[in-house]
Image (cartoon, grey):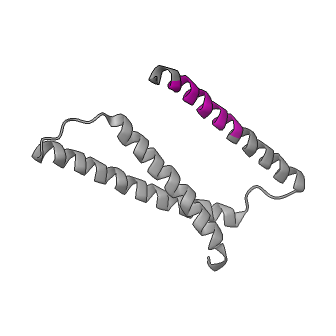
Amino acid sequence: MVDFIWPLVSIGIGVVVVFIGILFLLLRLRDKRSGFPAQDERTLKINGIAARYALHIGLYFMLGVMFVLIIGQEFFGMPDLNAGPVIIAAILVFSLTYLGLQFYFDKKRDQM
């Protein structure tokens, strides 16, 4: 059963990635045609602040995961885990934190 489902899931993921890319390009072209500036000083400031906070939160998350893995292996006899899921979790924390903070600071930009 798994051999049948995995190719379908892979094709679905590929279609979603291509759809998001096309949507992004269409929105970019629409903004360019309307004369809307892609970035201004305020947008650069918001992106910088969001990136800085996301970097700090992501690094603290990775440090926390490292300490849990080290303490679990040394004191509680946990087996050595495969690093794949940990790396995926770290990438998700970095990315989602950046996107969330960028959205938050964009909404809050009138107070900045």
Q: Position of residue 61 (x, y in %)?
A: 36, 54
Magenta run includes residue 83: no
Magenta run includes residue 9: yes
**In the image, residue 55 above or below residue 12:** below
54 left or right of 11 in image: left
Image quadrant in which the C terminus is located: bottom right
> In terms of secondary structure, what is the magenta stretch mainly?
helix
What are the residue bounds of the magenta stretch? 5-19
How many discs mark residues in the rendered view?
A: 0
State the image quarter where residue 23 is shown: top right
State the image quarter where residue 103 is shown: bottom right
At 50% from the left and 57% from the top, the residue drawn is 97
Q: Position of residue 48 (x, y in %)?
A: 57, 60
Q: Position of residue 12 (x, y in %)?
A: 61, 32
At 35% from the left and 50% from the top, the residue drawn is 62
87 left or right of 45 in image: left
At 41% from the left and 46% from the top, the residue drawn is 90
**In the image, residue 8 above or below residue 61:** above
Taking depth in this image into account, of 68 and 4 the one nearest to the observer is 4
79 left or right of 85 in image: left
At 22% from the left and 35% from the top, the residue drawn is 80
